[in-house]
Amino acid sequence: MASTADFRNGLCIKFKDDIYTIVSFLHVKPGKGPAFVRTKLRNVKSGRVIENTFNSGVKVEEVRVERRQYQFLYRDDMGLNVMNNETFEQISIPEAMIDNNDLMKEGQMIEIQFHADEEVPLTAEMPEKVELTIVSTIEGEKGNTASSTALKPATVETGAEVMVPMFINEGDVIRVSTSDRSYSERVKQ
């Protein structure tokens, strides 16, 4: 059990029969009345952020969470199959657990957050940026290829479609942001 004095950013707590992580908190001591703690909590499973006020000194149940590196192996009808590189244990996680999972290629490392006591995966995150090879795209028009604001669709090696500048051609390796699927830069080879 933890009290409001133990609150810190990133602390996972059990609240309303769900697991939340503290995004931000503020201890408030008004001139009149008891002190309280104003918090923003993110639901670990849904990602929804809520605000809540706790009276000072209230006890909350702390949840122990572990972050582990896993390697993406393949996808099938069960979901995404990943392997722990230390123990070589393989598990399957649902595809909905990772946003933009169609940008993942085999062998890529992801970070999974586990409920330490129950060994249940809570969240999974891809790296901030991934490097992918362009498999197909339309040719840029002559004179229009120098612009970085004009975009065209391109299919990458994982089968996902991203928007890239006109000067990108088939076979180029690009860096893509996994949060919004945006083109970041061309990788020098």
Image (spheres, grey):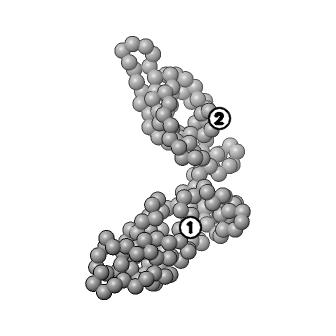
Instruction: List x then y, in percent, for residue 23.
Output: 47, 40
Above or below residue 79? Residue 42 is above
SS for dot 1: helix
Q: Residues within 10 Å of mark 1 (few under 14, many from 20)?
A: some
Residue 61: image quadrant is top right
Taking the spot 65% from the left edge, 35% from the top edge, the residue there is 17
Instruction: List x then y, in percent, for residue 145.
Output: 31, 81
**Of 45 and 55, which appears nearest the observer?**
45
Camera sees residue 106: yes
Q: Quadrant of the C terminus?
A: bottom left
**Of 183 and 54, which appears nearest the observer?**
183
Taking the spot 57% from the left edge, 58% from the top edge, the residue there is 98
SS for dot 2: loop
Q: Quadrant of the N terminus?
A: top right
**Residue that mark 2 sits on:** 17
Q: Which mark is residue 182?
A: none
Q: Relative to residue 149, is residue 13 drawn left or right?
A: right
Taking the spot 53% from the left edge, 43% from the top edge, the residue there is 48
Identify residue type, mark 2: Asp
Above or below residue 164? Residue 113 is above
Return the residue found at the far bottom.
142
Instruction: List x then y, in percent, for residue 99.
Output: 54, 58
Above or below residue 66? Residue 28 is above
Identify residue type, mark 1: Asp
Alpha carbons under labels 1 and 2: distance apart: 32 Å
Return the residue found at the far right.
78
Return the residue found at the far top.
32
Question: Looking at the image, do the residues carrying marks 1 and 2 touch, with CB atoms under 8 Å apart?
Answer: no
Above or below residue 5? Residue 83 is below
Q: Which mark is residue 102?
A: 1
Taking the spot 53% from the left edge, 62% from the top edge, the residue there is 100
Camera sees residue 128: no
